[in-house]
Amino acid sequence: NGQSKKPLSSVQTSEVQPSANKESSLDPELFVRAHSPRIGNSMARVVVVEWLDPECEACRAMHPFVKKIEAEYKDRVLFVTRYMPYHGGSHFAISILEEARELDKFDEALDIIFEKQPEWGSHQNPNPDLIPSYLTKIGIPKERLEKDRIIQKHQKTVEMDKEDGEKVGVR
């Protein structure tokens, strides 16, 4: 049925059209990469790409609305998540999300990370080291979330998403 179950979160939409002027055209690959979490119809003509930062308060505020839109349109639209690390604890939080994705627990992990963001992501006193303790409740072993190891493991993904986002104008 063309459905793929992987997740999403802060909505940036753009239409990619071929252009005679190579400088003004955007490579569609900049929007969707093989590693990108996605949900919805993989054969859809409409693709919505959301660049998110798990430590971003606006991304957190939008998350319930994004989930509602995904649920309503997943048969007709492909929703893709990309990362844009703007805050100090973002790299670790994103690395945790990537580890959760590998365990097919991305949606659950993203929900918990946004739910608990006021505790771990305070701009005055951020403490992303709290995140692993939240995710043991969904069956992710703490040892899979060792900070230095997973940041190194997922560094290229985080950097690629950030570079792609900058190239397409995500701010």
Image: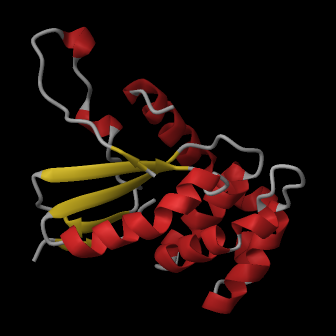
Q: In this rendered view, identify the residue nearer to me: 156 or 134.
A: 134
Q: Quadrant of residue 43?
A: bottom left
Question: Which residue is pictured at 40% across the width and 62% down the height?
Answer: 37
Q: Is residue 20 left or right of residue 83?
A: left
Percent of width and height locating residue 51: 46, 47
Q: Is residue 147 left or right of residue 94?
A: right
Q: Is residue 124 left or right of residue 47?
A: right
- Residue 5 seen in the figure: no
Where is 65 relative to 88, above or below? below
Question: Which residue is pictured at 83% across the width and 66% down the height?
Answer: 129
Percent of width and height locating residue 65: 40, 66
Q: Quadrant of the N terminus?
A: bottom left
Q: Quadrant of residue 57?
A: bottom right
Where is 33 relative to 66, above or below? above
Q: In this rendered view, identify the residue nearer to me: 113 or 31.
A: 113
Question: Which residue is pictured at 42% across the width and 27% down the height?
Answer: 169
Residue found at the very far right of the displayed protein: 125
How many numbered circles are shown? 0
Q: Is residue 139 left or right of residue 82?
A: right
Question: Which residue is pictured at 76% across the width and 59% down the height?
Answer: 121
Percent of width and height locating residue 63: 48, 64
Percent of width and height locating residue 88: 77, 45
- Which color scheme does this rendered protein use? secondary structure
Where is 63 relative to 138, above or below? above
- Residue 158 seen in the figure: yes
Q: Quadrant of residue 36?
A: bottom left
Q: In this rendered view, identify the residue nearer to me: 158 or 59.
A: 59
